[in-house]
Amino acid sequence: MAAPLPAAKAAQTPHALVIGGGLGGIAAALRMRAKGYRVTLLERGDQLGGRAQVFEKDGFRHDAGPTVVTAPFLFEELFQLFDRKLEDYLTLVPLAPWYRFQFPDGDTFDYGPTPEDTRREIARFDERDVQGYEDLLAHSKKLFDTGFTELADQPFHNPLTMLKQGPRLLWLRADRTVWQLIAKHFRSDKLRQAFTIQPLLVGGSPFDTTSIYGLIHYLEARWGIFFAKGGTGAIVAALAKLMQETGIEVNMNTTVASVLIENGVARGATLESGENIASDIVISNADPMHLYGSMVPKSAQSLSARLKHRYAKLSMGLFVLYFGTTKKYPDVAHHTIWMGKRYKALLEDIFKRRILCDDFSLYVHRPTATDPSFAPEGCDAFYALAPVPNLLGDVDWAVEGPKLQDRIVHALSQSMLPGLEDCITADFFVTPEHFASRHLSHAGAGFSIAPYFTQSAWFRFHNRAEGIKNLYLTGAGTHPGAGMPGVLCSAKALEKLIPDAQ
């Protein structure tokens, strides 16, 4: 069990420098500390967590980004590394339902918390689709056993690894899209929409995302979906406490300008202030598009890294409206997927045409359904997230942001939040420009590069940097991908690449 190092010993202990305090960077810092390294984490903002930061306004609290907690064992592992228990730091609350889908005609579909609950809901739409759901879960388990259990923390920097695993991925039809997988199992168009929404939670269109992400259905069925008491910010706070207890040095408000490279080997980092910090290894939790575009010279990169950066297809952007209400909406679920009138055509407008349309679909988060502390007494806290074009689209957000807020508030007021226009308070929003400036996300993409088959495994940015020794990558843009389980597994993959400190 690692503990804070005495000063004399620290000077002789190999040093791991972690750039970026998102969940991937935090997990990497903890795993390196458990391997015996002296660890320094640098975060450019004033909060840890990356996209999982916390906003507060007028007594309302909001988790800024990820709110759906799956695979809780990945968090438990980080505490077990130091013979600690997650439950001593954090309380996870199971949700029921996991999601509520609301369709334009007023129909709703509650997903979870048990397969039996889901079967009953499916039967209301088409009884034949109950068997389709059973078949989907069986296939999803196969995807999970290979795509998650065996490969999620398996580094893919070696092309031989891809050649070895390629036949298995093709046997599981990973070349097929999520939409193609779900359409095979469901007749109801509404259920097809409901069961293909998961790729959007990690940055891809279900019409282009590899069906390997169909493993999420088994993951959810096996472990459920949780909310942390106090929100995702409470998870970050628990991990921050663990880092403090184990002697990890955390420096906030510290922006790295570039990685120090000598003769093809990463030797530390240069800060925007001009200061150099030396280290034996460097772990980047920055967006790989920013890392390879601005933080390391092209001359030090391999051809594959330069090609991936040049031809990468990015995830969509995000418009997130945070607000409170001066009254409560007790019948609104914790997670609601508010479906617009268009599905495939809307996603093509966002991902391919990169245009902002008048219509939208929303993910609506109401944390006060589970934890009233997010709002003053008698009030509710919400955020409404709309997928939108990233900054490669020609959208003037200074003009279009307020207009989109008005359209969203009006639509919700006419549907799941009646009277919202009269009781909304403490509202503000962020656009793709926020992700570009705050998180240095290339083109304001919400999840770095998109999760397509041609951008997965070996084709994704590697966990071991391409062309530079002693530089490693973690986070949404590297293998295995975005989402809390993905970024935690990216840090886990480093354990197989980085030797114990000597």
Image (cartoon, rainbow, N blue to C red):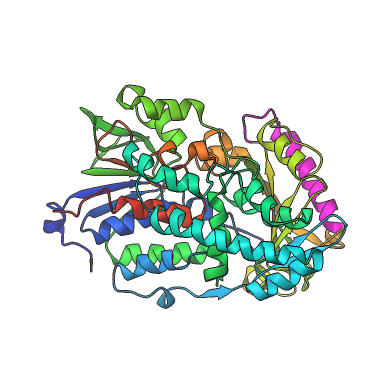
Q: Position of residue 449 (x, y in %)?
A: 52, 38
Where on the picture, by quarter, is residue 176? top right
Q: Is residue 106 left or right of residue 207?
A: right
Residue that appears at 54% across and 44% down: 447
Q: Answer left or right for 243 relative to 396.
A: left
465, above or below 219, in the image = above
In the picture shown, does residue 499 fall above or below 77? above
Q: Is residue 113 visible?
A: no
Q: Residue at x 61, y 37 (%)?
A: 433
* Number of residue marks: 0
Q: Is residue 409 magenta?
A: yes
Q: Residue at x 56, y 63 (%)?
A: 138
The residue sitting at the bottom extreme is 88
Q: Nearer the viewer, residue 193 or 392?
A: 193
Q: Position of residue 280 (x, y in %)?
A: 20, 43
Q: Residue at x 67, y 75 (%)?
A: 116
The image quadrant of residue 60 is: bottom right
Outermost residue on the top side: it is: 299
Would residue 388 be seen by someone viewing this image from the given angle? yes
Q: Closer to the camera, 489 or 118?
A: 118
Picture coordinates of residue 327, whole percent (x, y): 79, 69
In the image, 40 versus 302, the foreground residue is 302
* Magenta segment boundaries in residue numbering: 390-413
x, y percent for residue 3: 23, 66
Q: Is residue 197 magenta?
A: no
Q: Is residue 204 above or below residue 237?
A: above
Q: Indicate left or right for 230 with 127 as reference.
A: left
Q: Main secondary structure of the magenta part?
A: helix
